[in-house]
Amino acid sequence: MSYSIKRITQAADCDVLLTWAAKEKADLDFQMLSEGRLTNKFETSSIEVQAILQGVLAELSALDVVLVVLLEGPSKVDAAKKKVKLEYKKFLLENRKESYGLVALLQKELDVQRIENEIEEVDGFIATLTAHKSDFVGYLFVEKRGLSWLDSPFL
């Protein structure tokens, strides 16, 4: 993006903007670190949740078959209780999957990409401002010494 850098006419203004940009970059670097760690956690969690959920689904399928075959009695009651517990566990895992699963992982990856783009933009801003400040400082050097631009050591 092009900035209105040419409107800056004092080195002090450049210094203020460079200080602000450095703080912004530090904040973005911290965000990047945090989001990177969360992304890694979500990566691990999404695989773990999916694996556990598959196990619970397999157990539920097997338990359905067992419940059909069992005669009324304490074994069937125990199997029915176990099925209720497994259905609740399935419910919890499906909720965790939404919060920490693949969808959440992709959202975190998008957040990381946004932060990377912001860091690149701030780096570009700092480079542009630094280049402008060095031109400005060169101009002050020439003006203070009474030299023309042609005599400047910066050319």
Image (cartoon, rainbow, N blue to C red):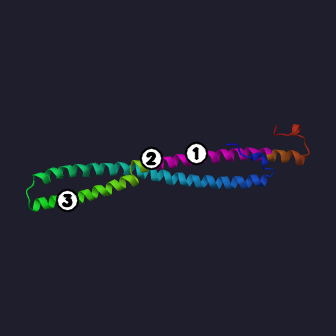
For residue 117, which numbered disc appears in the image?
A: 1
For residue 106, which numbered disc appears in the image?
A: 2
Element under label 3?
helix
In three-dimensional space, the C-alpha distance between marks 1 and 2, rounded to whole angstroms, equals: 17 Å
- Which residue is disc 3 drawn over? 82
- Amino acid carrying label 3: it is Lys
From the viewer's perspective, is 118 left or right of 72? right
Residue depicted at 45% across the width and 47% down the height: 106
Q: Residues within 10 Å of mark 1 (few under 14, many from 20)?
A: few
Q: Is residue 108 magenta?
A: yes
Residue depicted at 90% across the width and 46% down the height: 145
Looking at marks 1 and 2 on the same chain, the residue that comes earlier in the sequence is marked by 2
From the viewer's perspective, is 116 left or right of 95? right
Residue depicted at 37% across the width and 50% down the height: 46
Contact between marks 3 and 1 (CB within 8 A): the answer is: no
Residue depicted at 38% across the width and 50% down the height: 101
Horizontal and vertical percent position of residue 55: 25, 50
When asked about the image quadrant of residue 81, the answer is: bottom left
Looking at marks 3 and 1 on the same chain, the residue that comes earlier in the sequence is marked by 3
Q: How many marks?
A: 3
In three-dimensional space, the C-alpha distance between marks 3 and 2, rounded to whole angstroms, equals: 34 Å
